[in-house]
Image: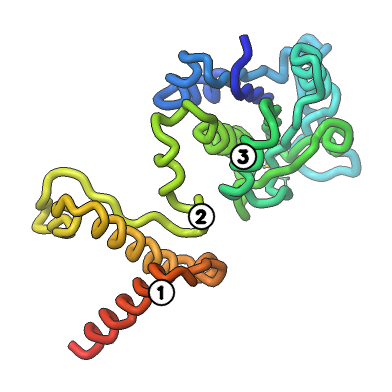
Amino acid sequence: MAFQYHIHIMTLFPDVVGDMLCESILGRAQERDIIRIDCHQIRDYTLNKQKQVDDYPYGGGHGAVMQADPLYQCWKHICDEMGKRVHTIYLSPAGHVFRQADAKRLQREYDSLILVCGHYEGVDERFIQECVDEEISLGDFVLTGGEIPAMAVADAVCRLVPGVLSDPECFIEESHWDGLLECPQYSRPEVWHDKRVPPILLSGHHANIAKWRRKQAILRTRDRRPDMYEKLDLSSKADQKLLKEISAEEAEHSEE
Ligand SMILES: C[S@@+](CC[C@H](N)C(=O)[O-])C[C@H]1O[C@@H](n2cnc3c(N)ncnc32)[C@H](O)[C@@H]1O
């Protein structure tokens, strides 16, 4: 079966990870054979009876390190089955921080990935040198294992595979697609806890709604993420008009 995208996750907790990624949108995409996510138990590739995958760190220190060989055997098994060396990512706090641009690149440039989840104090560097093409971090913090980052990467990449979401506009209009944060969203009822939905959204005037949404997205990005705002290209006539409106509205409010 040729899936459009195939992700392999090497982990000590395949059931938990597999269950999570079988739910909702990704679950339905797997049922429809658009994508496939296989979770591999690293312990199945050990040669010892106890299925031990870790050992003490050379040089001393606390904790344990995941040994290179069980990881290598698991990785090799996947590559042999796939008939090729598969782009391999080790989830690591020492990797480059994952962004939407990486999700787009991974979806565009590959049709399969191996995501390696570390545990304990991390994995033997020699496995990384031999098998890993890229190290990705979920952010500047340390988790107990690579499972949550692997699920985040798998989810962000898979939802970009054509057919996984019902409509490409679903992600094109979302935060981070083109450097903007998304505008605020509302659903029924029209009034909740005395808070009204902005009247423009009830007007049925599509052009005005689109303009309002763009303006809100620009404002939200400016106020919450000045680093992103700095990089925005707002030179179009339409955006320049919106910026003028924003300045005029803010001037009016400051006079009140
Ligand atoms: C406790 S961490 C090891 C941290 C490592 N000793 C260090 O200081 O860089 C165990 C595993 O969790 C995963 N992990 C922890 N934080 C992560 C992050 N921010 N991004 C991606 N993976 C992370 C990695 O797979 C790592 O091997």
Quarter that holds the N terminus: top right
Is ligand 1 closer than 8 angstroms to the Cβ of mark 3? yes
Q: Residue at x 72, y 48 (%)?
A: 95
Q: Earlier in the sequence, mark 1 or mark 2?
A: 2
Residue 22 sits above or below residue 58 on the image: above
Residue 18 sits above or below residue 49 on the image: below
Image x and y of residue 6, in percent? 63, 22
Q: Residue at x 41, y 41 (%)?
A: 169
**Amino acid type of the residue that numbered disc 2 sits on in the rendered structure:** Asp
Image x and y of residue 54, in percent? 78, 28
Front of the two marks 1 and 2: 1
Q: Residue at x 52, y 14 (%)?
A: 33
Tell me the SS state at disc 2. loop
Tell me whether circle 1 and circle 2 mark residues in contact (CB < 8 Å).
no
Disc number for residue 178: 2
Image x and y of residue 174, in percent? 42, 48
**Is residue 178 visible in the rendered structure shown here?**
yes
Residue indicated by mark 3: 144
Question: Badge 1: how crowded within 10 Å, few (<14), some, or many (20+)?
Answer: few
